[in-house]
Image (cartoon, rainbow, N blue to C red):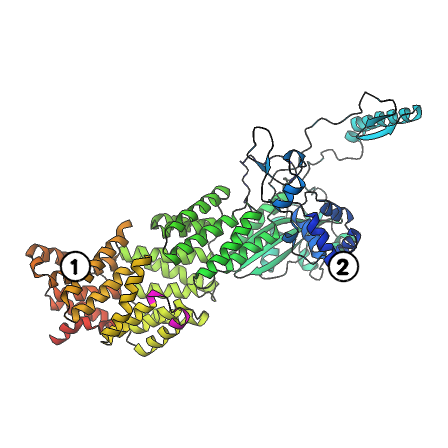
């Protein structure tokens, strides 16, 4: 359930809040729909909803520009064939209607900030703020009584000017006295229940409640949870959802006197998520009870948690919390849908546009801030620019301030920490998200990616087992999500099971033919020696993303293995220049590959320069934390090769130190580390150890073991 309101802000005044429709936009929509009057709109709503009477009062309030709940505007918008948000009063119109804040109605839904010394406040520029969760309170101002000063011709009473006459005076005085008597005695003793409920609270006493089945994905589960939450707390009709399966309109039950209150619902599917809302119908009135977002694969626990707040508000006779606008939830989910495929700047910018719209319309809800934090982190990764992480942190901090227990904000905080290299903190945020929702696919997938980094550093088998178990579980509940087998394939690759990794990448590529799935599949096929398949997948990936540096590097490496060195250099060298200009990770790998080609060609000075550049770039990348196993093995191999190419550096003390570093990496199992260990021992003069690691590499990646780097080892066999 939406819990994005901050109850500790100065904006939470105990008064009615809501949103207002634009009279100008309403008039335009009325004409566009071919209606001539508000009465026709009321009649259209009556027809759509099957009401006994047209809701003329509701339509009048909306067209008058009164503050109303979002559902009221939505009902009018539906009759006018418009989206509700297109009718909202915007900030420009607010300034036009109320240029001086003192004239803004006191029950306005606009929140006033930053009072100036002259009390001329500026209205908030967001015109559709979600109401806070306070009960409506009676006004604290003193009532207006008749003035005691009567003019010669007329006098004023209750704001009305009345002509003076003796008869009129007598009548007016009798009315006033009668009103006082009624207010003093009748209202407290006649016709009311002993304990009248405060405004904003729904009276469930002596009421029969019915539930209409909620249709749509997970509708059966949601209906069941609503029934369970109502059971034993109201005079709820047990099994009513089954009894009323054929009922489509709550008014059928209410008009037939089969229930006093009816709960119904609506589900809209957007990508992998569901926007859910419940309605409460009583007499001719229908209000939105709650709105929530759940994944299609959501756990029963999470669904119940999202529904429980709204249902308990009813049965415990608590003030009703106005939930998030229906259109706002769907806009947030449209933004999230842009991140279902592979990462691209276009998808990121489109998602950001939706999230900024959510913040503009609902600045007190967590969703827009969580979305912008998530998107800013993705932008940082896509552009290799750390500046976006500062922006992401601002959005995440605001979201966490509003709703610290939000699933979306905890996943976003984990992504932010991971992008900053704070892997332990990221792990805690992901675990917090999984405590809130055990079935959260984004939390499981990102947690697993984060723990792969831990595995490469510690090589703890328990860490890898945890990763595989979580991803296997996630794949069962969401089998059509390509990111799950993709991440599981990476896990198998780093644990040395290449054929299992290929199986997962093939599965991911069947679900989504994109650059990432094809590139990684090609790399694994290269690993096992299937060069033709690797070349085919690389070519398909190149057609999708011809500018992508990693793919070009893989193609160049393929040329190197085929001993087509000039073709490899023709790819590597421009890449290095481009990365030197734009920055970004991976530069050390390119320098290392170029150095290997120069070394094999006998161009020792160029090789030395390239190795030194590679080591400098590698040190820069691991500067923020401890290097992982692959990076340590890579740096060791480069240091050994620099020593071999620089005879004056070859001291017994240095060689002994390098051998100790190699021995410390004796337990590596990933292909990259095995390759560099075999190369290190080869040039440290221990061919036996070099063959041991080369054979281990051959057992899992025969394609990598065929590297020209091992030419001297083959000659000595």
Res 434 seen here: no
Work out whether residue 603 or residue 337 is closer to the camera in this orientation and state it.
603
Q: Position of residue 548 (x, y in %)?
A: 36, 66
Res 74 seen here: yes
Say which residue appears at 26% left-offset and 62% top-offset. Answer: 589
Say which residue appears at 19% left-offset and 73% top-offset. Answer: 708
Say which residue appears at 13% left-offset and 72% top-offset. Answer: 712
Quarter that holds the C terminus: bottom left
> Tag 1's secondary structure?
helix
Ranked by sequence position, the earlier of labels 1 and 2 is 2
Task: Look at the image and say whether residue 652 sits in the magenta stretch.
Answer: no
Q: Residue 296: give its label.
A: none
Q: Residues within 10 Å of mark 2 (few under 14, many from 20)?
A: few
Q: Residues within 10 Å of mark 1 (few under 14, many from 20)?
A: some
Segment colored magenta? 542-550
Q: Is residue 323 left or right of residue 143?
A: left
**Quarter of the view holding residue 251:** bottom right
Q: Is residue 8 left or right of residue 569?
A: right
Residue denoted by label 2: 34
> What whole-number distance in Å separates the C-alpha atoms at marks 1 and 2?
79 Å
Q: Position of residue 505 (x, y in %)?
A: 38, 69
Position of residue 129 relative to residue 149, above or below, is below
Work out whether residue 238 or residue 571 is closer to the camera in this orientation and state it.
571
| Foreground disc of the pair 1, 2 | 2
Q: Is residue 220 left or right of residue 624?
A: right
Q: Residue 639: give its label.
A: 1
> Tag 2's secondary structure?
loop
Q: Circles 1 and 2: CB distance less than 8 Å?
A: no
Q: Position of residue 379 (x, y in %)?
A: 42, 55
Position of residue 477 relative to residue 400, above or below, is below
**Residue that extends furthest to the top in the rendered view of this protein:** 149
Q: Position of residue 663 (x, y in %)?
A: 16, 59
């Amino acid at each position: 359930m939406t819990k994005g309101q901050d109850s500790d802000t100065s904006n939470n005044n105990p008064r009615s809040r809501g949103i207002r429709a634009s009279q100008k936009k309403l008039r335009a929509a009325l004409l566009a729909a071919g209606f001539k009057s508000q009465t026709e709109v009321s009649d259209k709503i009556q027809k759509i909803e099957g009401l006994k009477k047209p809701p003329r009062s509701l339509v009048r309030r909306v067209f008058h520009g009164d503050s109303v709940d979002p559902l009221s505007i939505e009902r009018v918008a539906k009759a006018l064939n418009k989206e509700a948000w297109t009718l909202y009063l915007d900030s420009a119109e607010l300034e036009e209607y109320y240029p001086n804040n003192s004239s803004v109605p006191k029950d306005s839904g606009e929140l006033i900030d930053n009072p100036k010394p002259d009390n001329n406040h500026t209205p908030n520029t967001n015109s559709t703020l979600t109401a806070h969760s306070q009960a409506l309170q009676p006004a604290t101002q003193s009532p207006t009584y008749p003035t005691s000063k009567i003019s010669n011709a007329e006098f004023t009473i209750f704001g009305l000017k009345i002509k003076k006459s003796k008869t009129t005076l007598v009548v007016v005085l009798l009315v006033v006295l009668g009103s006082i008597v009624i207010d003093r005695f009748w209202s407290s003793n006649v016709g009311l229940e002993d304990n009248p409920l405060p405004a904003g609270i729904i009276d469930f006493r002596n009421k029969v409640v019915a539930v209409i089945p909620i249709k749509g994905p997970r509708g059966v589960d949601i209906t069941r949870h609503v029934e369970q939450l109502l059971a034993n707390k109201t005079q709820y009709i047990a099994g009513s959802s089954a009894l009323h399966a054929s009922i489509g309109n709550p008014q059928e039950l209410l008009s037939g006197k089969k229930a006093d209150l009816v709960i119904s619902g609506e589900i809209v599917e957007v990508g992998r998520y569901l926007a859910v809302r419940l309605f409460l119908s009583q007499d001719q009135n229908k209000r939105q009870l709650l709105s929530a977002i759940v994944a299609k694969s959501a756990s029963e626990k999470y669904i119940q948690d999202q529904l429980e707040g709204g249902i308990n508000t009813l049965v415990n006779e608590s003030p009703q919390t106005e939930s998030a606008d229906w259109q706002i939830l769907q806009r947030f989910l449209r933004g999230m849908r842009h991140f279902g495929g592979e990462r691209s700047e276009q998808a990121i910018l489109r998602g950001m546009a939706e999230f900024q719209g959510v913040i503009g319309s609902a600045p007190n809800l967590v969703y827009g801030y969580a979305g912008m934090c998530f998107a800013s982190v993705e932008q940082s990764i896509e552009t290799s620019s750390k500046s976006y992480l500062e922006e992401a942190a601002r959005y995440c901090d605001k979201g966490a301030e509003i709703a610290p227990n939000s699933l979306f904000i905890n996943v976003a905080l984990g992504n932010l920490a991971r992008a900053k290299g704070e892997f332990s903190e990221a792990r805690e945020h992901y675990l917090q998200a999984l405590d809130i929702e055990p079935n959260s696919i984004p939390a499981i997938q990102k947690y697993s990616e984060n723990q792969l980094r831990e595995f490469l550093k510690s090589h703890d088998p328990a860490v890898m087992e945890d990763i595989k178990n979580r991803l296997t579980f996630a794949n069962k509940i969401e089998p059509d999500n390509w990111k799950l087998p993709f991440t599981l394939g990476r896990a198998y690759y780093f644990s040395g099971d290449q054929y299992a990794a290929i199986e997962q990448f093939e599965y991911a590529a069947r679900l989504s033919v994109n650059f990432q799935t094809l590139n990684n599949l090609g790399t694994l096929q290269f690993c096992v020696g299937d060069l033709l398949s690797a070349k085919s997948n690389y070519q398909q990936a190149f057609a999708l993303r011809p500018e992508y540096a990693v793919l070009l590097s893989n193609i160049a490496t393929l040329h190197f293995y085929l001993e087509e060195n000039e073709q490899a250099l023709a790819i590597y060298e421009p890449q290095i220049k481009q990365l030197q200009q734009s920055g970004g990770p991976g530069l050390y790998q390119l320098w290392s590959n170029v150095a290997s080609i120069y070394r094999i060609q006998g161009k020792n000075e160029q090789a030395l320069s390239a190795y030194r550049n590679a080591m400098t770039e590698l040190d820069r990348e691991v500067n923020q934390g401890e290097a992982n196993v692959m990076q340590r093995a890579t740096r060791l191999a480069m240091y050994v090769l620099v020593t071999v190419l620089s005879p004056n550096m070859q001291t017994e003390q240095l060689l002994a130190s390098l051998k100790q570093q190699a021995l410390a990496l004796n337990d590596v199992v990933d292909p990259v580390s095995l390759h560099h260990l075999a190369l290190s021992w080869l040039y440290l003069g221990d061919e036996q150890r070099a063959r041991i690691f080369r054979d281990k590499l051959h057992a899992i990646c025969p394609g990598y073991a065929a590297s020209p780097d091992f030419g001297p080892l083959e000659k000595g066999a």
